[in-house]
Amino acid sequence: MTEEHFFQCPHCWEEISMIFDKSVYKDSYIEDCEVCCNPIDISYASNGDEIISFSADSIEQ
C-alpha cells in the first residue's frame, strides 16, 4: 500500500517525489531533497486508501 507523491522542493523548487506507505495513517520526518540535498520537513496523513494531507517545508530559517 504505497503511493508515489510528487511535489516541489521548498529550497530549489525542483519537482521531486517520495514514496509513502498509505497504511501509516500519520507520519512526519526529515528527508533530504534528492536534487539539492537540503533538509525538508515532510508530514502526511492517509486514510488507508489515499494521501489526504501533505506538507513539505524548509527547516532552515
Image (tube, rainbow, N blue to C red):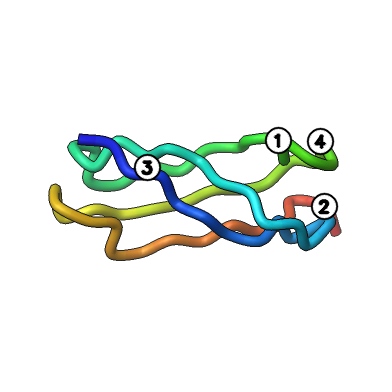
Q: Does 15 sit left or right of 49 as displayed? A: right
**Marker disc for residue 27:** 3
Task: Say what amino acid the circle numbered 1 marks.
Answer: Asp
- Considering the numbered disc 1 on the image, is that residue within a helix, a strand or a loop? strand
Q: Residue at x 44, y 51 (%)?
A: 5
> Which numbered circle lies on residue 56?
none
**Distance between the Cα atoms at labels 4 and 1?**
5 Å
Say which amino acid is labelled 3: Asp
Q: In the rendered image of this protein, does residue 25 appear above or below residue 7?
A: above
Give the x, y percent position of residue 39. Answer: 74, 41
Q: Which residue is mark 2?
A: 60
Residue at mark 1 to residue at mark 3: CA–CA distance: 16 Å
Label 2 or label 1, whichever lies nearer to me, is: 1
Q: CA distance from mark 2 to mark 1?
A: 12 Å
- Label 4, label 3: how far apart the Cα atoms are: 21 Å
Question: Could you tell me if the residues under marks 4 and 3 are in contact, i.e. CB atoms within 8 Å?
Answer: no
The mark that comes first in sequence, 2 or 4, is 4
Provide the residue designation for mark 1.
Answer: 32
Gap in Å between the C-alphas at discs 2 and 4? 13 Å
Circles 4 and 1 in contact, beta carbons < 8 Å: yes
The answer to whether mark 1 and mark 3 are in CB contact below 8 A is no
Q: Check residue 37 in the rendering and tell me which mark sits there, or answer none.
A: 4
- For badge 4, the amino acid type reads Cys
Give the number of marks. Answer: 4
Q: Callout 1 environment at 10 Å: few (<14), some (14 to 19), or many (20+)?
A: few
Image quadrant assignment for residue 31: top right
Q: Earlier in the sequence, mark 2 or mark 1?
A: 1
**Res 19 quadrant in image:** top left
Mark found first going from the N terminus, 2 or 3: 3
Gap between marks 2 and 3 measured at Cα: 20 Å
